[in-house]
Amino acid sequence: MNPHTATIFPLALRRIATGIASAALLLTVLGVLGGCRRQPETIANSDNKSGKAATTLTTNDSKPTQQVRTAANDDIKFLLPGKGVIAVFTTKSPSLIIHAADPNLRAVYAWEPGQEPKLLVQGKIYGIARLSDDSFAAWYSDKDDQVSVVTFNGHQLTSQPLGLPKFSGWSACEGNDEMLVCQGNRPDTNANDVDERGFTAILVVDLAARKTSWFDVGYRTDYRLDASRKLIYVSDQFARARGVEIFNLKGESLGTSDESHLQATSPSGRFIESLPADGAESWQIYELATKQQLFAFNCGEPDCKTGDHNDSYWNPIIDGQFAVVRNSGKPHGKDSSCDVYQASPPHLVKSFPCNALMVYDWSRDGKDLVTLEWDGGTYHRERVN
């Protein structure tokens, strides 16, 4: 099977999160600014826009929550009344980054299981990107629809908010400690001319210099950042003849390439995932060098396996190891399982019970799979390696 024509189906949880994202509320950013001087009013960025200054959060600002304190990790809950867990990110410390929401509000917390969570960011949060093992970025808007970005770690904010250009739809951001790259739409774009997957511009945020720039890429639907090489790949699924165009961070076109550069890879780059497409649930994993198919999921054939995944399914340390959720199809995701596979040679490493309506991430040492149920926040840490 051609790896460029296969598809991937997102988790039901991500559909739930998308529904919550439509809610808008005044944004407040809270946190301890590591190494940054607090500003009394606003801060200016390179585009002459202002981001809201962050307010300091002390331990006295953390309100007691309904925490279950016990040594058994399945009894520990991230529990805030009315809030569900959208995403979890591990760090090198015991602290986790939790993205939580109710129907009207999203928030980011730093949380050490069994302790009280610390509120870092609250409001209309569009997304969170992992920059490194211990650093993250969130982008959000305030009541004036000014989109800003802020960085943080497992304990505190590490930058003041930086205002982004007032264009529409900055999303799908990726990056590292030096930069954040997002897709969006240029100012003159008619919303009726761009579908939900389409975009017309690329935004580059220099996190160290606190500068932003953007460039026009025409109408596109597919995008991928190669952070290590500082290259951006864009394409249009409705005009494949145009090929995949390569840009540097300055917006200079470096020519075209094939679609393999759009495909997500394992951390080492040895294994590659099939390209996403609308309307299909099947997806595959291949070895990049040989294009040999190693696994096929949700395709309905005898040798096909069942499983969906999120963005952090590859083990960050053990090459080729990945985790999927096998949904039982029962109400509320009950009696489902988490399955861990090794890509080469292909085999099942471990399977254990988990709720399908949950989020997960690998521990930074690659030994454990950390899960949090969306409804109720039950925390579990499963030793795999």
Image (cartoon, rainbow, N blue to C red):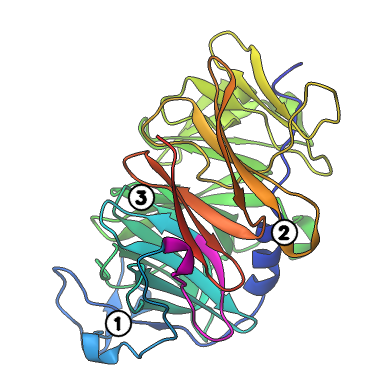
Tag 2 residue: 333
Front position among marks 3 and 2: 2
Q: Provide the residue span drawn in magenta.
A: 73-87
- Disc 3 residue type? Leu
The one of 12 and 330 positioned closer to us in this rendering:
330
Mark 3 crowdedness (10 Å alpha carbons): few <14, some 14-19, many ≥20: some
Residue at 53% over, 22% down: 271
The N terminus lies in quadrant: top right
Query: Is residue 369 found left or right of 46 in the rendered image?
Result: right
Query: Is residue 210 found left or right of 222 in the rendered image?
Result: left
Tag 3 residue: 131
For the residues labelled 2 and 1, say whether their Cβ atoms are less than 8 Å apart: no
Answer with mark 3 or mark 1, whichever residue precedes in sequence: 1
Q: Secondary structure at mark 1?
A: loop
Residue at 74% over, 30% down: 305
Query: Is residue 204 found left or right of 257 in the rendered image?
Result: left
Query: Is residue 339 found left or right of 165 in the rendered image?
Result: right
Whether residue 74 appears in magenta in the rendering, the answer is yes
- Disc 2 residue type? Gly
